[in-house]
Amino acid sequence: MSELEQLLEAVAAAEGAGEEAVLATVVKVEGSAYRRPGARMLINTLGQTAGTVSGGCLETEVARTAWWLTERGPALRSYSTAEDAEDGDAAVRFGLGCNGTVHLLFERITSTACQLLLASARDLVAPQGGAMATVVGPAHSGLLGQRSLLDGAGRTAGSLPASLQAPLQSLLLQARDAPRASLHQFEQSGGQVLEVLLEPLRPARRLVIFGGGHDAQPLVSMARLQGLHVTLIDSRAHFARAARFPDAHAVLQGDLQQPDALLPLLDDAAVVIMTHSLQQDACWLDLAVRSAASYIGQLGPRERTERLLAGVQRPLPAQLHYPVGLDLGGDTPQSVALAVLAEITAVAHQRQGGKLQQRRTAIHDPVPIERHARVVSPSLSEKY
């Protein structure tokens, strides 16, 4: 389950109980910060939270102030993690020495724009995904928190005025396929700059595991903790049992005589093959190589995998990794699972999986900020 899907579950639970809640969203980051734009946290009337907007440093303060900040509608607030001695009059200061500023948008889930987000996101978290544009500044623009959403079919809906919908259409299409959120600044008449956060909305990444042995069990459990949607497949009935893998979303018995029936399941999924059976591995590896999987990992020694690949079509896809996993040195099932998930995560984020202490640039790639030429300012009739 993706972070957005978990948040939607928390919203649904609050609505089902007839409770209000406040949604806090990271909309901009300057300097060092634990979470990136698009991270969200839900706060109920008791101050209980779901999700995170930092590494635990800001959550208590955010929960404490969320309700009074939104008494008159959506609100923006900044939190500085710079040292106390630094100038931070424009932000709440925490003196953590991280030298960053996190900007949060606060909204009651009863607001029209927030309801649009929540209702649309339920539909957008589909295989094709979507994108969302949210006005995140300035606070006095009259448009704070207003949104435009793009679904998988390219249709848009939202509460933004028509003068902004047009320039956002092409940007939303780009955002749908982008690896991360981006910030866009639109020049308005009178010198005002409107800031809009564009986010891709995607379902949870999928992991398909071929092999139901004991070493697959920690991989399933740990993948579920990472928010992946997990499907386990084995041709052996005594391994392909849901009771063995309670954390899997689906457990299937695969047919070695008709492997192509599973081909659509592998589209854009991470695939790990670990059956410990030459016959099964050969079948599922051939299937994976012919699929549109985003990652393919084969367990076992390099020489064994190369024998399995002897009869596989060439050229081999770049997404094939063998032996599967990062070189962490462990040999327990749990250590193997950690190494496999670490490599899948690194590949998904286009990283090498090396030590952070050897990284010479920032831990997180900066959120791109694009400036756009002046667009027609929305009239008062458009705003409200």
Image: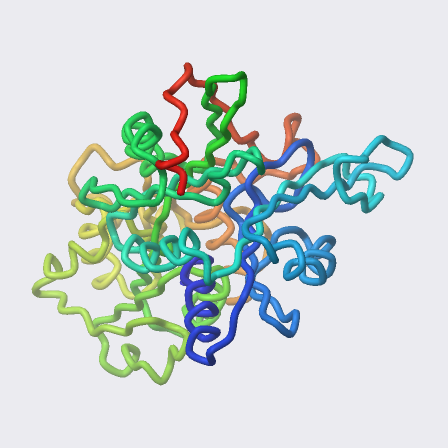
**Residue 238, quarter of picture:** bottom left
Q: Name the quadrant of the N terminus.
A: bottom left
Q: Position of residue 326 (x, y in %)?
A: 51, 47
Q: Position of residue 207 (x, y in %)?
A: 35, 58
Query: Which color scheme did the rendering employ for the protein?
Result: rainbow
Q: Name the quadrant of the C terminus.
A: top left
Q: Which residue sits at x=41%, y=74%?
A: 247
Relative horizontal placement of residue 113, taking residue 354 as reference (left or right): left
Instruction: Examine the rendered structure and indicate whether residue 357 appears above or below residue 311.
Output: above
4 and 17: which one is in front?
Answer: 17
Q: Which residue sits at x=47%, y=17%?
A: 189
Instruction: Examine the rendered structure and indicate whether residue 309 appears above or below residue 372.
Output: below
Which residue is the extreme one toward the top?
Answer: 373
Residue 317 visible, this orientation: yes
Which residue is the extreme one toward the right?
Answer: 85
Q: Position of residue 20 (x, y in %)?
A: 52, 70
Q: Where is residue 241 in the image (x, y as percent from the top left)?
A: 29, 81
Instruction: Examine the rendered structure and indicate whether residue 220 appears above or below residue 152.
Output: below
Residue 300 visible, this orientation: no
Relative horizontal placement of residue 94, taking residue 175 as reference (left or right): right
**Residue 306, quarter of picture:** top left
280 and 376: which one is in front?
Answer: 376
Q: Which residue sits at x=32%, y=60%?
A: 122
Which residue is the extreme one toward the left?
Answer: 258
**Residue 309, quarter of picture:** top left
Count every numbered label the image shows and give the total: 0
Relative horizontal placement of residue 106, taking residue 346 as reference (left or right): right
Q: Which residue sits at x=35%, y=85%?
A: 243
